[in-house]
Amino acid sequence: MNTAHRSRRLAATALVTALAGTGLTVAAAPAAHAAASDVVAKLPISSFSALAVDNVHQRVFVADRNVGYYLNSGTIAVYDFDGERLTTITTNQQHVSGLAVSADGGKLWVGLRERVETYDTVTYQRTSAAVASSDNCGREVAESGGQLYMTAPQAQYSSDCPTATTHLDGIVDGLYTRTGWNDSGQLLLEAGAGDRMLMGQPLNAKASNPFVTVFDTRDGSLVRNAARRFADSDGKGALNLKDMALSADGGKVALADASAGTRLLNTGDLSDADTAYRPLPAGATASAVAFSGDGTYIARGAAASGATPDLLVQPADPADATTPLEFVFEGSLDGDRVVPRGMEWSADGSRLFTVTTNASGNQFWLHVIQPPAVQYDVRFTGDLAHSPAQAVAGEPLAVRGRLEYDGPAPAQPLKVTATRTDANGTHELGTFTVREDGTFTVLDEPDLVGDAVYTVSYLGDLTHRPATDLTRTVSVGKAPSSLTLTAPAEATLDGGIEITGTFTAQGKALPERAVLKVERTDRLGTGTLTPVTVAADGTFTINDIPRTRREVTYTVTWPGDTLHTGSTASATVFVRR
């Protein structure tokens, strides 16, 4: 049965192409070989327990845990790498939980209620079964160091599962064994490079400060290496573990922490890595994490609503600022969020397999995502320019440039980001669209006099490589101010003089009303009158009784401030008796 179809929503900084006749959209480059694609299959399951990938035969296995009743039969849906369902394996009165594929791709290990079975990955026939400790909660299964390990929660009722004592067991050299490691809660297992295996503890009522630890599984042994708990002395910062992954080289551990987002640790001692991943989008709660087998990408799954991304695919190196490819899952064609432990990569990094669920958690979808296989170069051409030629504090400034890119023309414009660095530090100016002719305009309003360095960046995405930054230094001056006076041509000693005026200051608004200095000059000399405060509308009035006949000159001055130049104006009145 072919249940594959294109995703309804895939939001990305890459490219968006309408799917003819369907009303669906997918973020993609016009050239198929460079595009990110998302094929979606509706899964024939009502609950989810595990996802495993056979890279040798290109098979994907998705398990339905179905633990509501102890005699429930479980199912394993089998797909190829293109999202076509090949078959469904049904377990007889045994709910199915953990899955693992052997290193050679020949065996599928299946964790059941009372045993662990082995299936041939080509014929899908059961080849062996090993008795295991009875499990009513669902067990994890992982192959590491050539041996099989599994968890065995001990709970009579499903309501006891979150706090059940869980043992770490194994089939070592063909014999079922209890390793002696155990703790409360449904412990998680994850195998990785270098014969390492992670064990993590979910947050539960009996574990307020859960752990994550690394085991060395070489030579059939199980040696615990680094371990870490995360709460501080006040009990804050505890791990709320949903998923974990080892990097392709085994040197890093990534945790999907529903409280803290994506944690990146050094495998050797589980200390925080020097560079962390940027936070997930606001409103997204971490649910899953997976490194691609070729070491290129990390996928970070989340639970989010509305237009907030549920999945980010980005370079595995946290120092690489390439813009992630973002997926929004929403509705009956996609699911609404990525399920915990619901992501696996193909070994070559060409496909990401992601399981999503709806808000109720009773329907599931398999997404087969192919990140772009090709990246194109992008570059800035020429220098940045700005206008007006003389920038002033508090007034709009436009910085212009041009961006060129190789490869097909994008269906959605590229975007650049910009910063301004001045004496007060570096300021993010936002994102600006590149027009069809490659030009862009960065709009700003500098608020400090002096040199301002504008830096324009194109961070790239999974289709386009980042461009080398372009900078321009702009000298920002003070904004001008002006004074105008209206005075009578003649006046009398007895009638007095009234002069009106207007004060204006361009740029940033003054923090307080301007206070003007007023001087009077006549044949007896120069003297200072009472200062005048400008009204809210910029007007002011000067009233004076002259002290002598003939010409009297009134000079009004504003000294300026840190952002505005000063200004002055004069008016002369002839005074009669």
Image (cartoon, helix red, strand yellow):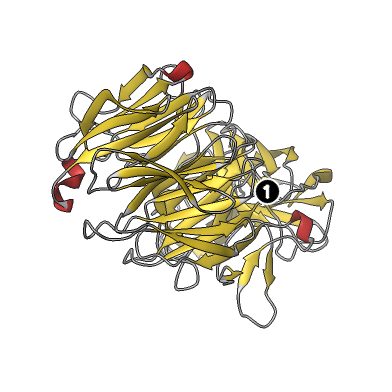
Q: Which residue is mark 1?
A: 462
Q: Secondary structure at mark 1?
A: loop
In this image, 487 relative to 141: left or right?
right
66 displayed left or right of 420: left
Pick the residue in front: 358 or 103.
Answer: 103
Q: Residue at x 70, y 79 (%)?
A: 20
Q: Residue 160 vs residue 489: left or right? A: left
Instruction: Judge left or right: residue 130 versus residue 448.
Output: left
| Res. 198 image quadrant | top left
In this view, the residue in front, 401 or 4, is 4
Above or below residue 390? Residue 165 is: above
Tell me the kind of residue under disc 1: Leu
> Residue 532: image x %, image y %?
41, 51
Residue 99 lies, with reference to residue 30, above or below; the image says: above
| Residue occupying the point 43% across, 19% down | 220
Residue 109 lies, with reference to residue 405, above or below; the image says above
